[in-house]
Image (cartoon, rainbow, N blue to C red):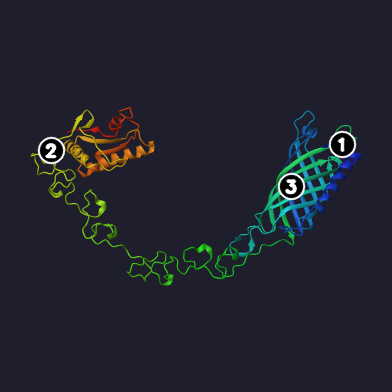
Amino acid sequence: MHGGRRNGKAGRGGSGGGRAAAWAAACAGVLLAAAPAGAETGTFDLHFEGGAAAFLTQPQTGYFGFGGSAAAAWEWSIVDLVGLELEYLFGGFTEGTGEFARPDGFLHLVGGGVRLRPINDSSGFALHVGDLPDWHRGNLHGDLWLSAHVGYVRTGGLNRLGFDAGAGYELSLVDGFSFGPYVRYLQVVQPDDDPLDPADAKALAFGLAGTFCLTSCSVHVEPPDTDGDGLYDHLDGCPAAAEDRDGFADGDGCPDPDNDGDTVPDGADGCPDEPEDPDGRHDDDGCPEPEIDSDGDTRLDEDDACPAEAEDRDGFEDEDGCPEPDNDRDGILDEDDDCPLESEVINGLEDTDGCPDQTLVHVEHDRILLEEMVHFEFNTAVLRPGSLRILQDVARLLLAHPEYRRVSIEGHTDYRGSDEFNLRLSQQRADRVRDTLVRLGVEPERLETRGFGKTRPIAEGRTLADNRRNRRVEFVIIELGPR
């Protein structure tokens, strides 16, 4: 390309014309390779292209800078997926930055060629727009196309042979129109006897392309909906029976006369989405009857060990549904027992108050120290009976000293078991101690719990004695106020 340097004749030189002839033969071969298929485009189509362009080889890359390209082509589809085209292509390039830079350059190509569509399916995903039944979205499968042309190229005052080849992929927005990205290669044949620029000019253009179908365009046809329930037959589980649109499994296209499957038809079912429980009580209304709680303790009779006696909800064995008048079974009823969770020690010292009289706790600095350890059942957070009297002393101490505003209950385990298990177990045990203290009268806001698992041993060994020392519950005073 010579951008306006001088005038000359197009097509000089034997080898340049030979290259163009070879390209034309290759384009003709594309026609013979075509295979029939359903087409998205029509018999006659109009194509447009627009985008950026740049030269690929010297000396043109030194002459000219970046530019743009636009093209239009009229196509006649002679067989399925193959058409003949007439094309006009324009390219414009800015002044280059090299030593021999030229002013702005332009080229014009007029020629003919072929277009091949390996993918041009008309059965794409069609969507209605609004209430217009004949207006459809296009084919989202897209249109993959290849094209090639041979023609005359004019640059400045010179006419030459040239050829191009392009490829693109277009998505159909509505019937009859599609657009998408493209790339095109252009080569201007330079006569070999040109003493200044013997090499062919080669350029690349890329951008967006669009296609308008002019005649015989494929039109999407709405699939049948035999039962008129809004689901196309190929998506309808019952194409001959309309969906009942009752909010239950409406997406399958089938009516559901008994949604909950309890054999009571929905029309007679008081609870169409809840199955009847055949328990001999109103089994024909289609609704499950509420469970019975005879003693009103919120525990259903079927799960209540004492369905005629209400649970006393005193924090002691409340899960069984039975009242426990003497939780600690020391012979002193809970209502008269100052320590309902600790058995009285019959030792001649206030034996009628229901509390053991010896003390097992004392305070040193910020620690509440126990004379005996709090014990649990193996691998559980269930307190052993002997530990209740220890916690009773702890509760008595806290109630007698309101200045201990906040106390941390910290659970620890030995080395046996996984880290995760021991952390969980130590937290559960600390929580159980807190709950017991709350039942004994300690305000819950004064207590907090932490489980450390086996992360803070006080004995480094692994003997039975070491393990016993490490399995412990500790009490730490973390906030102290005035008495």
User: Residue under circle 2?
Assistant: 357
The Cα–Cα distance between marks 2 and 3, rounded to whole angstroms, is 98 Å
Q: Position of 22 compared to 420: left or right?
A: right
Question: In the rendered structure, which amino acid carries the disc numbered 1?
Answer: Arg
Dividing the picture into quadrants, the one containing residue 65 is top right
Label disc, if present, on residue 481 of the rendered structure: none
The Cα–Cα distance between marks 1 and 2, rounded to whole angstroms, is 122 Å
N-term mark: 2 or 3? 3
**Residue 152 pos. (x, y %):** 85, 45
Q: Quadrant of the C terminus?
A: top left
Query: Residue extending furthest left?
Result: 348
Q: Secondary structure at mark 2?
A: loop
Q: Looking at this view, is 21 or 363 the one in front? A: 363
User: Residue under circle 3?
Assistant: 167
Vertical placement of residue 132 versus 440, above or below: below
Query: Circle 2: is it few (<14), some (14-19), or many (20+) Cα within 10 Å?
Result: some
Query: Residue extending furthest front?
Result: 464
Q: Secondary structure at mark 1?
A: loop
